[in-house]
Amino acid sequence: MKICVLGGGNGAHTMAADLSLQGFDVTLCELPQFKKNIEKVIETKSIELMGAIEGTAELKGATTNIGEAIKDADHLYIVVPAFAHKIFAELLAGKLKKEQVIVLFPGTFGSLEFKEIFRKKGKDIGNVIGETQTLPYDTRLIAPAKCRIIDRLPAKIAFIPANKSKEILENMRDVYKALHLKGTYSDVIEAGLNSANPAMHTGVCVINIGRIENRAIKGDFYLYGEVTPSATKLNKKLDEERKEIGKKFGYNITSLEDYWRGWLKPGWDSKDLLRVMRGDPAALDEAEPNSIWHRYFTEDAAYGIVTWSSIAKQIGIPTPIMDSVINIYNVIHERDWWKEGRTVEDLGLSGMTMEEMKDYVKTGLKA
């Protein structure tokens, strides 16, 4: 199978190398304006992995020419922050073959934004588009073309249209195994609601703004190591609202405690969120966020709780805590995340009833 990994950050480097080490034909592609991110890979066609995955991978190629990169690819894996999904969707519209499969790692409803952009441009030719609820790795780019993998993460996948999931999963069986995927969701809405980071990060960040902005005086802020009982109360409320949205749809939404169960220190349990957040040995050493413009603030709000709240409003579920956090972020950043974030309009779901949404993601067709 020929795979094109689009992106140039931690996840894209790691996925391109991981799949190459397992025998897949992989090309890495970054946008021309960010060529510096993959210059070393373009030069050497290799990426070194250390940590949970070890080895030096030899890629088929690395380029900033998106047309050349995707020309012969069977699968296109988009491994970029959520705010970059729109850029890649607009670039790919009109360049795809119908049989090419697109997967976003992770998606946070990005699969629906891709499809809506294709539709608006008159370029929706029926490509199956998938997304996971998380990146399959906890990884850091520590030097050009060199990554340290802390661990594999338990990613699950969904597709639009959902009624083609069985066929696509059969087609990508080897990749599914190579990436250690842990299962599937019924559809991409369920996948998007199962993204844990927005509920995990946004609440803690909003009440630690003073500490984060005082790094020069107080030293680095360690979100997981410094989390307090009161901060996790806010996270719990955000999580409850997320689960209520999922319950209305009839989905199985994994709680924050259960989501992080796999990373707890030996002997710890997931009876309460505070123990979970303090029980991940890898996360305790991560000095972040380092500013109010860190992705824990911006991406997890604009492409996380804004999206959840937008969907909730359309199906009549109140989200007062999410809305409060977003409104505070609007003041802090002097931005309107309600307008800049990902909403039902961006997803092509505006005006739909809940049943119409579910039918759309099942068939990929609007009534």
Image (tube, rainbow, N blue to C red):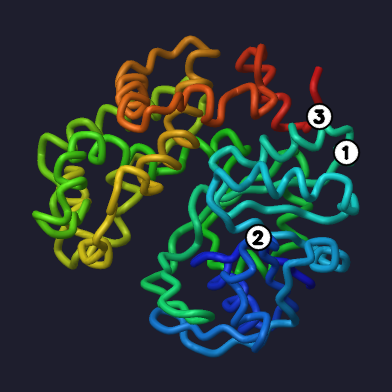
Q: Is mark 2 on a helix, strand or loop?
A: helix
Q: In the rendered view of the protein, which quadrant contains the N terminus?
A: bottom right
**Residue 33 numbered mark, or none:** 2
Measure how far apart labels 2 and 3 are at the Cα level.
25 Å
Is 243 on the left-hand or right-hand side of 314?
left
Kindly report which numbered mark, 2 or 3, lies closer to the viewer in this rendering: 2
Residue behind mark 3: 120
| Residue that carries the numbered disc 1 in the rendered image | 123
Q: Which amino acid does label 3 sit on?
A: Lys
Relative to residue 3, is residue 327 depicted above or below? above
Q: Does 164 sit above or below residue 286?
A: above
Viewer-proximal residue among 216 and 352: 216
The answer to whether mark 2 and mark 1 are in CB contact below 8 A is: no
Residue 140 in picture, x, y percent from top left: 41, 70
Vertical comparison of 205 with 139: above or below:
above
Q: Is residue 358 visible?
A: yes
Q: How many labels does the image show?
A: 3
CB-based contact (under 8 Å), mark 2 and mark 3: no
Give coordinates of residue 162: x percent, y percent. 71, 39
Q: Determine whether label 1 and label 3 are within 8 Å by CB.
A: no
Disc 1 to disc 3, how far (Cα)? 8 Å
> In this image, 194 relative to 344: left or right?
left
- Whether residue 271 is visible, yes or no, is no
State which tag comes first along the sequence, 2 or 1: 2
Residue located at (84% from left, 62% from top)? 67
What SS does tag 3 mark? Answer: helix
How far from the left and from the top, in percent, is residue 220?
Answer: 18, 59
Amino acid type of the residue tagged 1 in the rendering: Lys
Q: Please state the horizontal and vertical placement of residue 54, each as a whole percent of the image.
A: 47, 86
Residue in the image at 41% along x and 40% along y: 298
Q: In which quarter of the image is the C terminus?
A: top right
Q: Nearer the viewer, residue 201 or 159?
A: 201
